[in-house]
């Protein structure tokens, strides 16, 4: 490893940069000046949760999936590779995808996932494509929030039914079953139960589309509980294409009492055969052989209906009236009409949706917590999910290895430690591995030995993992596994996503957070409590979650916990904590005494997701929180300049519904801030007084955490894996005077001469983009004329020319000017030998020698 330093003839003075832009207000910085910066997808390419899938009749290799955070994806090679087709239009959480049976160019997509677990995200309505996903148009139902299913008329692509679940957090009117007969230009609610219950499933009779069945569901969540079931849950039938509906809930053979979620399907072979899977105290799989008039319970195996709210999907085979499938942790198949079931696993567990080709019941695609997988032999074999970069990450950190590695926990999978740059052409499966802890962990790599990592997981479990030896050791604060019980039984209340964190001052001091702050100095062999309860400790939020039918206590709803921690890098013992129930504390003496410093303008139930001490001011601290789980989608960002004695809300420029989870201060430039929201990332050049998008090429996706490391910014996306900007130089150096210039060459970050790697990207659909191996120059040029020559020249420190790139150059000496903001990668090489016509050299590429470590100059010439 060798380092190359660069001196520049056109460089900025940092003291001018800092004072200049901070003085501005209400004047956003022109993004085009730094749009040469790009986010790159690091990975991993391992699928996150998908809740909806479909194929296309007669097109054996074409399938679609809607993910829980990463938009809509398509495979055209039977699951070999996937590509996102919603980028540029929409992204995030997808509840339903449907392709018109009569015109496969017509696709409808509903936002807001149906799999409403604790990390669920809501959506913003419906989208339609008439060119197989090349372009999209928003077609309404913006307040439907969560869409459970879409059904399209078999011969008319303009007639479509949408099962809208509605707002998960509070009552609203835009829920129930909607119908459009003009391709989404207008909508009518043809089945409305109440403002607390929506439609979750819709099934058109495959043999008579005028007959249809609909399941309705009363479901509600908040920050500390989930309730599935109520008077609005039921089963309905229409025989006149949805004009009128008859409730079947009280038909003979169906369960009495309160219902929860309902799934329904109709045999493709026999229209009188209908199955339903119903959440109820007496629930299970039910079958009707007379079109829903009478019913028989065929199976009540708990394996088919455990955690019913998360599954409860049922599918009739397309060619055999006795075959029916049920989705759950495993997926189940019955060959005797639902009397008995065999259980199976696709490559990943927790199955949510299934599509079976009508012309070939061996061809199918399944959705689960690992994305989508395809089978051509009825489920005997499935395609991989290690080709979908849709991982959902909660947190991100880095270790002290060189090159540094990125660490985080993937929901529904393992933790991940991944190289931010590799020796190969790309970042592949060889460049990442599982680490300590589980799917919901904060990770804390040992500052002195990065091969040792500490990580938590749900219910307070915590482990120490040594990557050198492979040894895992339990380091729980308290030896208890309260699985199945409510938070009220726990000695210490640990969140699903509880923080673990090393002190920046004492490399042996590791913190862990329940409702108390715990510390160990002996690698977790013993723990000390150094705080009182730092939450609201409100009894009405501290009890078993679930009901009125099924309790559900996996740790997701454990509440009244510390959710964020930060110790000042300036002063040892100055520690801030924030709780998921809206309380912020500080201690200035290492935990001996604590002060409540909750911002007066913060909601009572604000989930304090991020605390960041100002790297440039010991008294400065930033805080990000969210209250979306109580139906409040506003952004909440605050700054204090006096250790939390007073606060200022700083959200100007962020849309009113873009709720926030992350706020990080730049480590080099005072007042430069980055904020992560549910719909993307924002930047502020004036300490939060004004915000503007910092999306660049980043897809629309929720940002759960941000991490500034050296010259880089890393985003933990919740549905598109890890992305990063390698060089923050352009935004760090931006100034009003600089922005007024006709052109400017930004100082690049110090470059490292590496033996291998960074030469490109082998397969964009399967591998992450590697860090560029060389020097990445960013520059802007305004009003470039078509025939104008612009040069970027690299020189020795004494002024001798090494290499020149020009807009009139050829091949590898071409300087591309695509927009105002641009970039160029110098591969650290001098020019090669001179060529002449007819020259042929076997296995001898014309590459010059590589630059030796030292100082170099560059200039932009116009």
Image: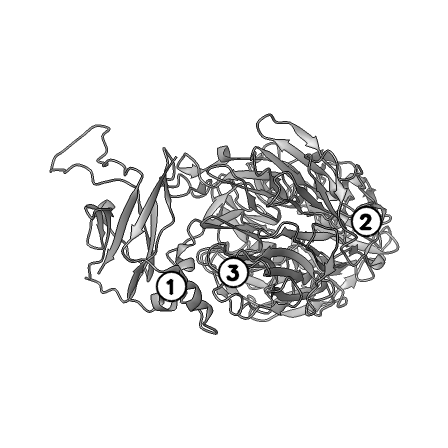
User: Contact, CB < 8 Å: mark 1 with mark 2?
Assistant: no
Q: Earlier in the sequence, mark 1 or mark 2?
A: 1
Q: Is residue 339 left or right of residue 211?
A: right
Give me the disc on residue 606.
Answer: none
Give me the disc on residue 487.
Answer: 2
How many numbered callouts? 3
Q: Earlier in the sequence, mark 3 or mark 1?
A: 1
Point out residue 619 in the picture as x, y percentages from the top left corner: 60, 61
Point out residue 564 in the picture as x, y percentages from the top left corner: 66, 53
Residue located beneath label 1 in the image: 32
Mark 3 to mark 1: distance in Å?
A: 19 Å
Q: Is residue 328 visible?
A: no
Out of 22 and 213, give the one closest to the viewer.
22
Give me the disc on residue 673.
Answer: 3
Point out residue 145 in the picture as x, y percentages from the top left corner: 65, 63
Point out residue 411 in the picture as x, y percentages from the top left corner: 63, 45
Mark 1 to mark 2: distance in Å?
A: 50 Å
The residue under the point 76% across, 42% down is 528
Element marked by disc 1 = helix
Out of 673 and 798, give the one closest to the viewer.
798
Q: Residues within 10 Å of mark 1 (few under 14, many from 20)?
A: some
């Amino acid at each position: 490893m060798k380092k190359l330093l660069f001196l520049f003839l056109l460089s900025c003075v940092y003291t001018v940069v800092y004072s200049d832009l901070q003085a501005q207000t209400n004047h956003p910085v022109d993004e085009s000046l730094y749009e040469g910066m790009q986010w790159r997808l690091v990975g991993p390419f391992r699928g996150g949760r998908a809740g909806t899938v479909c194929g296309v009749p007669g097109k054996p290799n074409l399938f679609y999936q809607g993910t829980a955070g990463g938009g809509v994806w398509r495979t055209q090679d039977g699951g070999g590779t996937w590509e996102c087709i919603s980028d540029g239009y929409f992204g995030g959480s997808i509840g339903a995808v449907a392709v018109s049976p009569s015109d496969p160019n017509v696709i409808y997509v509903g936002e807001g996932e149906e799999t409403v677990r604790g990390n669920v995200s809501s959506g913003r309505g419906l989208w339609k494509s008439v060119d197989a996903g090349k372009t999209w148009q928003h077609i309404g139902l913006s307040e439907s929030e969560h869409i459970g299913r879409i059904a399209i008329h078999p011969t008319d692509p303009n007639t479509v039914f949408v099962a809208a679940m509605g707002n998960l957090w509070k009552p609203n009117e835009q829920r129930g079953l909607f119908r459009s007969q003009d391709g989404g230009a207008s909508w009518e609610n043809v089945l409305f139960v109440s403002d607390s219950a929506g439609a979750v499933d819709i099934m058109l009779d495959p043999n008579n589309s005028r007959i249809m069945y609909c399941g309705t569901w009363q479901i509600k969540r908040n920050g500390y509980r989930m309730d599935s079931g109520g008077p609005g849950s039921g089963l309905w039938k229409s025989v006149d294409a949805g004009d009128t509906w008859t409730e079947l809930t009280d038909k003979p053979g169906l369960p009495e009492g309160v219902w929860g979620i309902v799934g329904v399907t109709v045999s493709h072979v026999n229209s009188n055969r209908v199955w339903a899977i119903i959440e109820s105290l007496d629930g299970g799989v039910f079958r009707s052989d007379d079109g829903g008039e009478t019913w028989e319970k065929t199976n009540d195996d708990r394996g088919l209906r455990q955690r019913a709210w998360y599954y409860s999907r049922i599918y009739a085979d397309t060619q055999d009236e006795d075959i029916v499938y049920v989705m759950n942790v495993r997926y189940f198949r019955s060959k005797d009409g639902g009397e008995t079931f065999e259980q199976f696993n696709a490559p990943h567990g927790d199955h949510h949706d299934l599509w079976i080709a009508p012309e070939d019941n061996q061809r199918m695609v399944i959705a689960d917590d690992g994305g989508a997988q395809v089978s051509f032999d009825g489920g005997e074999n499935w395609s991989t999910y290690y080709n979908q970069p849709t991982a959902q990450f909660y947190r991100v950190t880095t270790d002290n290895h060189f090159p540094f590695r990125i660490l985080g926990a993937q929901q529904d999978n393992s933790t991940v430690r991944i190289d931010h740059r590799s020796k190969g052409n790309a970042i592949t499966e060889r460049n990442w591995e599982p680490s300590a802890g589980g799917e919901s962990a904060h990770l804390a790599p040992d500052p002195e030995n990065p091969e040792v990592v500490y990580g938590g997981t749900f219910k307070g479990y915590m482990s120490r993992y040594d990557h050198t030896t492979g040894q895992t050791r339990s380091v729980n604060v308290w030896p208890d596994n309260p699985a199945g019980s409510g938070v009220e039984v726990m000695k210490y209340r640990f969140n699903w996503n509880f923080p673990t964190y090393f002190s920046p001052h004492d490399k042996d001091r590791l913190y862990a957070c329940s409702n108390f702050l715990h510390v160990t100095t002996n690698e977790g062999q013993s723990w000390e409590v150094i705080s009182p309860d730092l939450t609201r400790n409100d009894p009405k939020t501290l009890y078993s979650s679930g009901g009125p039918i099924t309790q559900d206590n996996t740790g997701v709803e454990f509440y009244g916990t510390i959710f964020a921690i930060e110790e000042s890098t300036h002063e040892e013992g100055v520690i801030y904590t924030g709780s998921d129930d809206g309380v912020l504390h500080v201690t200035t003496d290492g935990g001996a005494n604590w002060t409540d410093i909750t911002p007066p303008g913060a909601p009572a139930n604000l989930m304090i997701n991020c605390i960041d001490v100002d790297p440039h001011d010991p008294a400065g601290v930033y805080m990000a929180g969210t209250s979306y789980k109580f139906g409040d989608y506003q952004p909440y960002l605050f700054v204090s300049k006096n250790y939390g004695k007073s606060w200022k809300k700083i959200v100007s420029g962020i849309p009113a519904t873009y709720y926030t989870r992350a706020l990080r201060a730049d480590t080099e430039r005072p007042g430069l801030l980055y904020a992560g929201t549910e719909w993307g990332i924002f930047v502020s050049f004036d300490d939060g007084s004004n915000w503007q998008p910092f999306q660049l090429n980043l897809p629309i996706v929720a940002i759960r955490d941000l991490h500034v490391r050296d010259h880089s910014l890393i985003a933990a996306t919740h549905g598109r894996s890890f992305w990063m900007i390698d060089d923050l130089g352009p935004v760090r150096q931006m100034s009003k005077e600089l922005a007024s210039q006709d052109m400017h060459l930004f100082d690049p970050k110090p470059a490292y001469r590496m033996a291998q790697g960074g030469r490109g990207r082998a397969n964009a659909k399967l591998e992450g983009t590697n860090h560029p191996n060389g020097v990445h120059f960013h520059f802007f040029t305004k009003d470039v004329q078509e025939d104008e020559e612009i040069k970027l020249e690299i020189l020795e420190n004494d002024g001798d020319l090494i290499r020149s790139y020009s807009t009139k150059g050829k091949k590898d000496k071409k300087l591309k000017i695509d927009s105002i903001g641009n970039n160029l990668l110098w591969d650290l090489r001098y020019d090669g030998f001179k060529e002449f016509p007819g020259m042929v050299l076997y296995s001898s590429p014309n590459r010059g020698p590589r630059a030796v470590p030292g100082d170099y100059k560059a200039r932009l010439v116009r």
